[in-house]
Amino acid sequence: MAIARRRSRLTVAAILMVAAAFLMAACGLGSGGSAKAGAATAPAAHFRVSPMLRPSGRALGVVDDKTPWQYGIVTTFSKEAGRAPDIREYYSSWGDDFDTEGNAFLWQHGQLPMMALVPSGISLADIAKGKEDAYIRRLAGQIAAYDGPLALSFGGEMNGPWNSWGPRHSKTADFVASWKRVHDVFTAQGVTNVIWVWTPHVVDSGTTAKLRPYYPGSAYVDWVGLIGYYGPIDGTAFSSLFTPTLRQIAGFSSKPVLIAETGVAQSDRKEAHIRDLFQGAAKAGVIGLVWYDQRKDWPGSKQLMDWRISTSVGALAAFQVESTRNGFGHSFKSG
């Protein structure tokens, strides 16, 4: 459910980063160069995410298409869920600048920012070939300047044919190569505050592609993030919605699993589905669950679905009770 965002305004810090990029280009380190070129051109991040990579608890998060500064979703979710979210996920389009102040605001208020970077309007092959290195370096510098953690998902739902970077639109090898390119440039820039989250859609009737060919490798991934919804087409039980995908992933990755985007559509079974989701997720040992608390068309159709937890008193009660009963609520600030 990636949603394109308008290009954010450049902050003073971002302008300085752009200026630095021009100086780098003048020194022969411009777009298309080696990912290792200019390894010391951006300030190394002071914050290190290494202690956060194996959480001891289960986080509860919320995602929508608003910017980090649009804090209403956090306020509403906190009131309805009975506790503040531990993760605040949002979308950012390729070419957008990183909102340093907005992400710092989230972290200061107890939310781990999670940015889903959407490669819309760009060729994965071009990214893989280094043609977008100037932007990647700029973004890496901006994220390094933010002295806090960021969970970063690049090209989520890469196995979804509805995405321009998915099957029938882009080659699997180009996705893997582009992921590695972004990761390598960040590493060369000395960025230590990013948690790399690989986020396929669950394998179902609409996403039948094998996942292993899309996996960049354990050296390039910190968390596996799954996207899947209880809805009218697929998703009537955790055992059918998530378990088959979890088993497939277990064959090639031992990384912690985060349900990075999920929701339960309004129906006469919504309460039961919410209970099943939390119970199934806890039993599966995931490190967290991020809820899409919005109304939105079902992917590939114009059928409007209501995923909000407040669609009924029963749904709201089921969410509050089951999230607490199954131990969802883990502050990353407390380790």
Image (spheres, grey):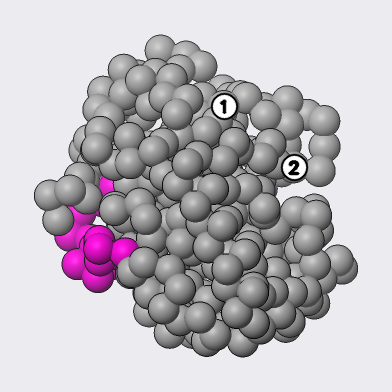
Residue behind mark 1: 294
Q: Which mark is residue 138?
A: none
Q: Which mark is residue 299?
A: 2
Q: Position of residue 118 (x, y in %)?
A: 65, 53
Q: Quadrant of the C terminus?
A: bottom left
Q: Position of residue 166 (x, y in %)?
A: 76, 64
Indicate the quadrant where residue 229 lies.
top right
Depth check, front residue: 129 or 289: 129
Residue 8 in the image: above or below residue 244: above
Specify whether residue 150 is painted magenta: no
| Magenta stretch, main secondary structure class | loop
Q: From which residue to which does the magenta span run?
A: 45-60
Residue at 41%, 36% in the rendered image? 102
SS at circle 1: loop
Q: How many marks?
A: 2
Indicate the quadrant where residue 274 lies.
top left
